[in-house]
């Protein structure tokens, strides 16, 4: 597979690793914001290959993990009590709501469907005119264009029984929230390559300047990650702070103007609740007021009582990198991927789930 | 392999006075008989089935028998590379093969949903016929029930089978030892991805076809040559290679080491997995098996397998170890390690 295998080359990874070892002289704490990167670090076993001085902290960039409990409850309610066809990306299904997950709602008779594209949901809506179809539009800036496009597409086709339940979150405000937390001790960030593919990289320059931290836009393959880490470590060792782009084969500085245009047509920035972290100003998208008929939240005016999170779950501290997953008393005991207390244990991109596998490894291999 | 055109030419559907299956076809009365007489018995003809009795009687020889059963509820029922009928035969034939047995007799039970088109049912029956012939197994007894529309999903099939265990076979989890090599007979994940490619909401264009096939010949040849050197056989169907190896690690209290670079995956399957956010280790297979063999014969086993039609891409993908008991460890292509866990439930595609 061209453009993939060459970024999984063991020799190249080994060379970068060696270079990281040669460069690093003292401990550094680097956060990879994106859950996809966490997943790749664990899946490829990169974490154990890094020298002990380089400490990777897994950030809040797992859209599944930060989707508020209340919104999952809403989705369950729409599917189970309102009889809508609820469509969603796959990994959202197992995340526990306050009473049940979407997968459990499905077992209880709700019409819940896993899709890869929201445009499929529009198709389902146009083919089933008698029923309401709701797409659970979860994700960072990456999935926003497709979700926005589905609304425009429905509007264009005159499909009235389609709407989206939005939980869109944005990366730069999340970095700000992490940096503004006094307890967080992050010294540099790997920014998510795919997010920048859409949005470009200019949003990160002010963050670099304000917090005096290196930010390196990084891809997802092993070679990308170790190169991104090396670029970060070099800056840290030199005492520099710059915005760099490791993923330049994909990320253009200006992003994808067409995609941004579609996002702006459908969404506007709004305050967002992040599961485990709380409210972050201007940290997400909601459907613009003039398209309210496509906004499931407004269309169905669902009022679900807000249930507090499990007190045992320290997801917020984990997502900000203040605590490591295994420092949670419930970790691996009361909270496992099978019976998760909080979302980071559910998604394969969640830091707790990643650590659950990783720590098992440490126990048995060391 | 499944060839729809060839099958239809050889076994055209007889002219019938009904086009769809109705509840009456499962009543046991006149309609049931009309359905069975329409060609079902002719299609699967053999002297045991021809008795049309409540069950089949057959002589047995000395030795050990294996017995296995499996139900097939796959959706869609037609997929690139096969159909549910073919799968139902191959699946049970292969389960028996994994016991070291050559399947001889199968039962075949249908649960049909009212409204199933006779044309589709016929195509499935033809699939059954060809798969049974290819595996050298006879359908000797069967059953047909029809459920109301909405109570099934077009067609469910159960097959059970019996067969004689190869006299030289000594297959069992207890025989697996540290140092044994883990061989996979061919590229993984093709079946699951072929099914996904035609599932509603996911259609993507691909040349990927299911690997469904019978494995009894391949297995019997190995047992002929290597006998007790073959310690364990498993077909990694549901849950894929990861699930089978985790079960093995759990039951033997041994560790499994996998070399990611050695695991064969067809390029287009790997590409689809990347696109869909799936791990090929957890994707279902239908036409491959895993063999745990004594280390001293491993290379020879692979060489032998490579010379046989259905296992040309056989390879050693890992080994059994006393270290990290009950755990499957993958050595990644780039030299890292990770634990390969038992999947929690169905593998769910990731957002990004």
Image: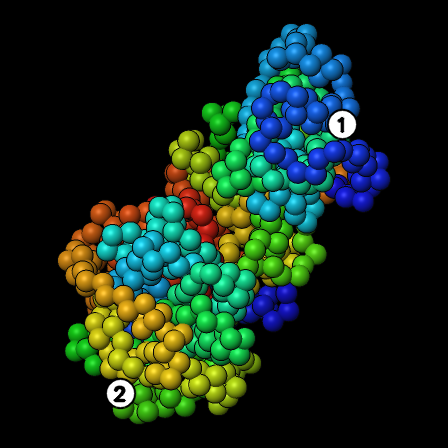
Query: Residue at 38% across / 84% down in the picture?
Result: A290
Contact flag, marks 2 and 1 (Cβ < 8 Å) = no
Mark 1: few, some, or many residues within 10 Å (few <14, many ≥20)?
A: some
Residue A344, percent from left and from top: 30, 60
SS for dot 1: helix
Question: Are discs 2 and 1 both within one chain?
Answer: no
**3D distance between C-alphas at marks 2 and 1:** 78 Å
Residue B149, percent from left and from top: 53, 39
Query: Residue at 28% across / 48% down in the picture?
Result: A339
- Mark identifier at residue A211: 2
Q: Is residue A187 above or below residue A307?
A: below
- Mark identifier at residue B300: none
Q: Name the residue beneath numbered marker 1.
A: B39
- The front one of A291 and B218 is A291
Q: How many marks?
A: 2
- The front one of A356 and B323 is A356
Q: In the picture, which quadrant includes the N terminus of chain B? A: top right
Mark 2: few, some, or many residues within 10 Å (few <14, many ≥20)?
A: some
Of badges 2 and 1, nearer the viewer stands 1
Residue B290 visible in the shown view: no
Residue A88, percent from left and from top: 43, 61
SS for dot 2: helix
- The front one of B64 and B198 is B198
In the picture, residue A127 is in which quadrant?
bottom right
Residue A266, percent from left and from top: 42, 82
- State which chain disc 1 sits on: B
In the picture, residue A39 is in which quadrant?
bottom left
Query: Residue at 47% across / 41% down in the picture?
Result: B243
Task: Answer with left or right where residue A180 lies relative to residue B98.
Answer: left
> Most extreme residue toward the right, as rendered?
B9
């Amino acid at each position: 597979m061209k453009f993939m295998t060459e970024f999984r080359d063991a020799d190249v990874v080994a060379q970068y690793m060696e270079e990281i070892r040669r460069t690093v002289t003292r401990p550094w704490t680097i956060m990879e914001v994106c859950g996809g990167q966490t997943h790749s670090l664990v899946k490829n076993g990169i974490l154990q290959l890094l020298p002990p001085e380089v400490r990777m902290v897994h950030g809040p960039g797992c859209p599944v993990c930060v989707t508020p409990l209340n919104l999952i409850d809403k989705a369950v309610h729409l599917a189970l009590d309102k009889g809508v066809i609820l469509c969603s990306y796959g990994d959202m299904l197992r995340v526990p709501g306050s009473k049940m997950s979407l997968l459990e709602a499905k077992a209880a008779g709700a019409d819940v469907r896993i899709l890869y594209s929201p445009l499929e949901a529009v198709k389902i809506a146009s083919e089933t005119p008698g029923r309401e179809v709701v797409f659970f539009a979860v994700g960072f800036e990456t999935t926003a264009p497709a979700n926005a496009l589905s609304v425009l597409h429905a509007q264009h086709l005159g499909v009235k029984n389609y709407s989206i339940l939005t939980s869109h979150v944005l990366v730069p405000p999340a970095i700000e929230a992490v940096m503004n937390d006094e307890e967080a001790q992050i010294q540099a960030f790997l920014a998510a390559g795919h997010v920048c593919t859409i949005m470009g990289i200019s949003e990160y320059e002010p963050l670099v300047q304000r917090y005096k931290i290196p930010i390196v836009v990084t891809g997802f393959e092993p070679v990308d990650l170790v190169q991104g880490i090396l670029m970060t470590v070099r800056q840290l060792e030199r005492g520099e702070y710059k915005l760099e782009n490791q993923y330049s084969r994909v990320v253009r500085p200006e992003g994808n103007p067409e995609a941004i245009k579609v996002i702006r047509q459908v969404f506007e920035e709004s305050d967002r609740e992040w599961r485990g972290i709380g409210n972050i100003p201007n940290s997400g998208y909601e459907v613009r007021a003039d398209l309210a008929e496509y906004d499931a939240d407004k269309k169905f005016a669902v009022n679900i009582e807000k249930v507090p999170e499990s007190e045992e779950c320290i997801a917020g501290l984990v997502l900000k990198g203040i605590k490591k997953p295994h420092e949670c008393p419930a970790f691996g005991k009361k909270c496992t991927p099978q019976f998760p207390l909080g979302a980071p244990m559910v998604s394969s991109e969640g830091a707790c789930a990643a650590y659950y596998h990783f720590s098992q490894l440490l126990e048995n291999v060391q | 392999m499944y060839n729809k055109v060839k099958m239809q030419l050889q076994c055209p559907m007889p002219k019938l006075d009904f086009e769809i299956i109705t509840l009456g076809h499962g009543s046991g009365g006149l309609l049931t008989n009309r359905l069975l007489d329409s060609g079902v018995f002719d299609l699967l003809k053999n002297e045991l089935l021809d008795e049309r009795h409540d069950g089949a009687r057959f002589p047995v020889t000395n030795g050990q028998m294996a017995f296995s059963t499996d139900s097939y509820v796959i959706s869609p029922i037609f997929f690139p590379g096969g159909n549910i009928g073919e799968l139902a035969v191959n699946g049970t034939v292969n389960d028996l093969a994994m016991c070291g047995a050559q399947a001889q007799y199968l039962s075949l039970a249908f649960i049909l949903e009212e409204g199933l088109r006779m044309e589709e049912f016929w195509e499935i029956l033809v699939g059954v016929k060809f798969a049974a012939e290819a595996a050298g197994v006879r359908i000797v007894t069967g059953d047909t029930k029809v459920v109301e529309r909405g109570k099934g999903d077009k067609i469910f099939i159960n097959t059970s089978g019996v067969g004689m265990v190869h006299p030289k076979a000594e297959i069992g989890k207890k025989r697996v030892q540290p140092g044994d090599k883990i061989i996979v007979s061919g590229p993984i994940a093709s079946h699951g991805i072929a099914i996904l490619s035609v599932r509603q909401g996911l259609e993507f264009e691909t040349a990927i076809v299911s690997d469904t096939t019978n494995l009894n010949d391949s297995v019997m040849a190995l047992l002929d040559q290597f006998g007790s050197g073959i310690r364990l056989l498993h077909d990694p169907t549901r849950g894929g290679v990861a699930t089978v190896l985790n079960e093995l690690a759990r039951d033997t209290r041994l560790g499994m080491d996998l070399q990611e670079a050695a695991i064969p995956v067809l390029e287009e399957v790997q590409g689809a997995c990347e696109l869909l956010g799936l791990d090929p280790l957890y994707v279902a297979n239908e036409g491959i098996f895993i063999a745990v063999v004594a280390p001293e014969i491993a290379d020879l086993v692979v060489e032998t397998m490579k010379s046989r039609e259905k296992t040309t891409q056989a390879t050693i993908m890992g080994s059994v170890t006393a270290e990290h008991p009950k755990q499957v460890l993958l050595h990644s292509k780039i030299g890292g390690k990770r634990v390969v866990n038992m999947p929690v439930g169905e593998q769910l595609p990731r957002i990004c």
